[in-house]
Image: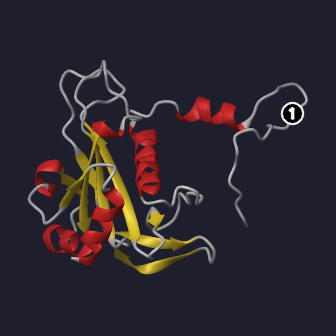
């Protein structure tokens, strides 16, 4: 099956209703603070910074992004602010569990559980004021870049990692503008 990049103007075919793919996107993905959409948006930000945003996201791939130089990137997202009412800020936690890779072309799983990307980018929506939070403002994000070997060595079979644990690892902290260069530096180190 071949996927084509949508423009948003494709019409939903119906006798009674008029709607487009853009209408669907607005309906489904406007909450960029919520856990699900924020995670996908964080992937997009990294893709945008690394100039692979014109590719089509494959949601069931073993990792999130293939960079042009062959680096495989996994993006994990967390935030202090959530969509729901909070009595206090959330503690940033990121999932890092090892998984079986699924080959969607062959429809089969690998037989070894592991972390499949070369580089892990922990994208933290770090803004802490619910009234002014804006995930579209890249200045409200911090990115922590760690290679798989460091993660495997220090975290073993752990299924999640806290921000405090991340900060104890060998990492590169990055802003949005320097993300592509810093991913490459981390890969080469």
Tell which residue pokes out farthest to the bottom in this image.
111
Towards the viewer: 155 or 174: 174
Corner quadrant of residue 128: top left
Q: Percent from the top left, x then y, of residue 158? A: 21, 63
Looking at the rendering, in which quadrant would you find the N terminus? bottom right
Q: Residue at x 36, y 61 (%)?
A: 180
Tell me: 92 left or right of 74.
Answer: left
Regarding residue 29, the answer to whether it shows in the image is: yes
Tell me: 59 left or right of 117.
Answer: right
Q: Residue at x 70, y 45 (%)?
A: 7
Tell which residue pokes out farthest to the left in this image.
168
- 171 shown above or below 122: below
Corner quadrant of residue 78: top left
Q: Percent from the top left, x then y, of residue 51? A: 48, 59
Q: Which residue is mark 1?
A: 14
Looking at the rendering, in which quadrant would you find the C terminus? bottom left
Q: Percent from the top left, x then y, of residue 87? A: 20, 21
Corner quadrant of residue 172: bottom left
Towards the viewer: 37 or 107: 37
Towards the viewer: 104 or 78: 78
Q: Percent from the top left, x then y, of residue 68? A: 48, 71
The residue carrying pointer 1 sits among few (fewer than 14), some (14 to 19) or many (20 or more) residues within 10 Å by Cα, namely few
Tell me: 182 left or right of 37.
Answer: left
State the SS at label 1.
loop
């Amino acid at each position: 099956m071949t996927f084509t990049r949508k423009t948003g103007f494709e019409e939903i075919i119906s006798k009674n209703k008029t709607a487009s793919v853009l209408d669907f996107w607005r309906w489904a993905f406007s909450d960029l603070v919520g856990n699900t959409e924020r995670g996908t948006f964080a992937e997009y930000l990294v893709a945008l910074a690394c100039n692979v945003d014109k590719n089509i996201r494959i949601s069931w791939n073993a990792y999130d992004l293939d960079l042009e130089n062959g680096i495989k990137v996994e993006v994990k997202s967390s935030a202090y602010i959530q969509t729901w009412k909070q009595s206090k800020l959330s503690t940033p936690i990121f999932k890092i569990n090892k998984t079986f890779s699924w080959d969607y072309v062959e429809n089969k799983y690998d037989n070894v559980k592991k972390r499949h990307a070369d580089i892990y980018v922990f994208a933290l929506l770090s803004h802490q004021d619910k009234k002014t939070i804006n995930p579209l403002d890249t200045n409200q994000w911090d990115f922590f870049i760690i290679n798989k070997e460091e993660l495997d060595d220090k975290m073993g079979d752990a299924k999640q990692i806290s921000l405090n644990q991340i900060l104890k690892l060998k990492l590169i902290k990055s802003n949005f503008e320097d993300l592509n260069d810093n991913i490459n530096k981390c890969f080469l180190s």
